[in-house]
Image: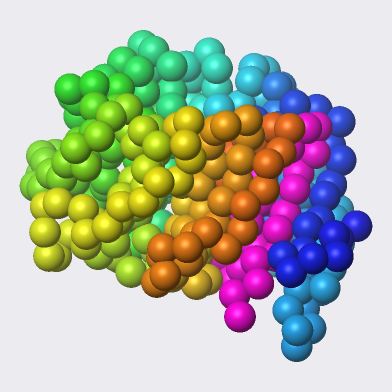
Amino acid sequence: MPETEKHKRFTYDCHDSVQVVRFCPLEFNTDILAVGTALRVLIICCKAKEERTGISGVEFEQIAEYNNGCRVIDICWSQQTDLLSLPRVLRLTTAGSDNQVRCLTSDLKTETTFVTVGEHKGYINAIANSLDDTDSVASVGDDNTCRVWQLSRPTEQPICFMLTSPGMAVCWHANDPGKILVAEKRGILRFYSTVSQRAFMSLECGHSPLVDADWSLTNELRVAVLAGTDWFIFDTSRSSHPLENKQAHSEGGRSISWSRSHDHLLATTGQPGFQLKVFNIRTSQAILVRDLKITNGLSWHNRLPLVAVGGDEQIILWAVDVI
């Protein structure tokens, strides 16, 4: 049920410890949310009821459940997913607490496969799927590497970029599938070409530990970084130094994500406690601040100002009032 407030809140009980949430980024499947728990992957439809005044409600329906075999650390969606045509194809990649990268493919009926793509020699912090049809997945971890896997060729050796500290985040360029961004814990951002297999640019936020970063899908020049207690905004065409920074969480941040529907909205989670904030970067003001029992994962709906986090055995969605 929604809260009676400016930013409406909606919840769905999933009776398990939620580790990560990830909305599907594909145009015709934007209401589908992948949820990673202690052992399972849940696929949930979150159908928003839209009115002139905004989002008035969300209808939830769990449409699939899979056993991942271990705790899910991160999830990313494949461009091969198609839930409208027949036969339906659900495809996503998970990073597990056993340091393995797995590809899940299902027709949502009887055919389901889990294929181990590869593994890191340390804890995996993040994975990301390419935004084109090559079906490449990049992963970063505490073994100071970024690895790029080919899901269509799981036995092939991955491209491996050696880092100078643990990789905390990885993102693909919105329009150039050969470029990826890797964020390192010591505060360095490096941009790599998967074609030349070399770095072609680097940035420094000047703060550590860097815990997360996100490359905007609506403005490919903008990168947001969460390091220490602050967020930083870079314009990669103008300067190697941050254009702006602001305190996000007084005791340290955990995750950061650009809105996919409104390019001035930026969400973060962090401490004290378990805190969610949404910032309007045009004014540098926090327009939503909530203290929760748990916040694991952070994801925006691809079309609506709807942000999801994993709560205490539940999924929590906020419809952010952007007026």
Q: Which corner quadrant holds the N terminus?
A: bottom right
Tag count? 0
Q: Looking at the image, which is closer to me, 270 or 147?
A: 270
Q: At x 84% / y 47%, what residue is drawn?
A: 12
Which quarter of the figure has residue 122? top left
Give x and y (percent) for residue 267: 52, 53
Q: At x 85% / y 60%, what residue is drawn?
A: 3
Residue sitting farthest toward the right:
1
Report whether 108 appears left or right of 181: right
Q: Looking at the image, which is closer to me, 85 or 185?
A: 185
Q: At x 48% / y 31%, what residue is drawn?
A: 251
In the image, residue 253 sits, relative to residue 121, either above or below, namely below
Q: Which corner quadrant holds the C terminus?
A: bottom right
In the image, residue 58 sits, relative to residue 71, either above or below, namely below
Report whether 20 appears left or right of 110: left
Q: At x 36% / y 23%, what residue is drawn?
A: 141
Report whether 198 appears left or right of 181: left
Q: Please check the rendered image and state whether residue 315 is part of the magenta-colored stretch, yes or no.
A: yes
In the image, residue 222 sits, relative to residue 252, either above or below, namely below
Query: Which region is colored magenta?
Result: 299-323
Which quarter of the figure has residue 158? top left
Give x and y (percent) for residue 284: 41, 63
Q: Is residue 105 visible?
A: no
Residue sitting farthest toward the bottom:
52
Q: Is residue 210 visible?
A: yes
Give x and y (percent) for residue 175: 30, 65
Give x and y (percent) for residue 11: 82, 50
